[in-house]
Amino acid sequence: MASLSSHNTLKDITLNDVSVGYDKCAVVQGASFTLLEGQIGCLLGPSGCGKSTLLRAIAGFEPLMSGEILLDDELISNHQQMISPEHRHIGMVFQDIALFPHLTIGQNIAFGLGEWSKGDAQRRVAYLLDLVGLSGFEQRYPHSLSGGQQQRVALARAIAPQPKLLLMDEPFSGLDAKLREELVPDIREILKHEKMSAILVTHDQMEAFAMADQISVMDAGKIHQTGSSYQIYHRPETRFVASFIGHGDFLPAKVCGADCVHSDLGTIRGKLNHGFADNTEVELLVRPDDILHDNDSEFMGVIVSKWFRGSHFLYRVKLASGKIVYCFVSSHHNHSMGEKIGLSVNLDHLVMFPK
Ligand SMILES: Nc1ncnc2c1ncn2[C@@H]1O[C@H](COP(=O)(O)OP(=O)(O)OP(=O)(O)O)[C@@H](O)[C@H]1O
């Protein structure tokens, strides 16, 4: 097995057409993306779609069936060879925090610094304790820390040896929602401060939005789209991405020109995502914030469900055609169930899929 020649610098990672599986059966097929130096990537998808398998392949725990993985243009895996995990200079953080219970917090963080001089290791530990907000905890033991504090230590331990890349497999899923909400932006800030390239695995899109610069949305072993949070929410490239990310409905529509469609909510104008011929029957993605409560509109719908969300209501509204759509309305407009309200659509890009 080969070994990487250099480390302690931050690197791009590229996956080219990677397939990984168990017992000759591929569970990840044709995965490709590049993550630039210092960026945080995310593999986002439902349970069982192959996120952890792909992450394990990047770490060097799973061989590739085909394709290749490059770290700073250096081949680390293809179907014939793989650099062993310990020679990849990749750090890992898991859901199961797994700190060493018999070692102090300082010793836990210093665990991967065996080749450093004692003085350098001490300085690195002190620096990281400060960075993760745990100065003064060096002599404590893991059991005396909260779950969030332990996860900060796990992060400090993983980045202590300055890996080329940090891999995080559902690192926040064992924490309660409130703690997660506080910890996720903190961890992002720490990684950005360290200019650390990282890949996060999660099935939680809010976590992905809060953490990642680049999200790869996966389903059934395939990456459907890689892009920013904005791109995957507003410019989904597949029907799966459109339905998995955020709330949304598909409105039956018919193309009526270069920039318009006819629908149950009238003629809607906007830029088309790709060229459909006139009269093509399509499904138009409409998000709750695309549908406006409009008393002047001729298009009416009946409220069939409502949720109070503080600043606004999320209504489910049944159109004359029987189609039901989401609609955000300011919480000053407290309509009753069964009430009819006027609706109009405000879209600048029309995201459509063939029917
Ligand atoms: N060691 C293994 N041997 C055989 N099949 C496996 C193994 N590990 C995972 N699988 C299968 O591979 C598929 C993908 O699993 P994987 O754990 O990668 O998905 P995931 O997206 O990370 O799911 P989750 O979010 O639930 O952890 C699943 O069908 C799973 O049962």
Image: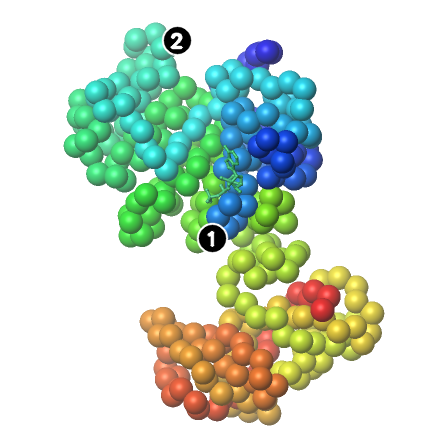
Q: Name the residue under label 2.
A: 115
**Closer to viewer: mark 1 or mark 2:** 1
Front position in the image: 158 or 188: 158
- Outermost residue to the front: 23
Q: Name the residue under label 1.
A: 205
Looking at the image, which residue is at 54% across and 24% down? 60
Rendering quarter of residue 290: bottom right
Badge 2 residue CB within 8 Å of ligand 1 = no
The quadrant the C terminus occupies is: bottom right
The quadrant the N terminus occupies is: top right
Secondary structure of the residue carrying numbered label 2: loop
Q: Earlier in the sequence, mark 1 or mark 2?
A: 2
Considering only vertical position in the picture, is 94 above or below 308?
above
Residue 177, percent across and down? Answer: 31, 52
Residue 178, percent across and down? Answer: 29, 52
Q: What residue type is labelled 2?
A: Glu
Front position in the image: 18 or 246: 18
The answer to whether marks 1 and 2 mark residues whose Cβ atoms lie closer than 8 Å is no
Secondary structure of the residue carrying numbered label 1: helix
Front position in the image: 349 or 67: 67
**Which mark is on residue 305?**
none
Looking at the image, which residue is at 65% across and 57% down? 238
Total label count?
Answer: 2
Q: Is residue 272 visible?
A: no
Q: Which amino acid does label 1 sit on?
A: Gln
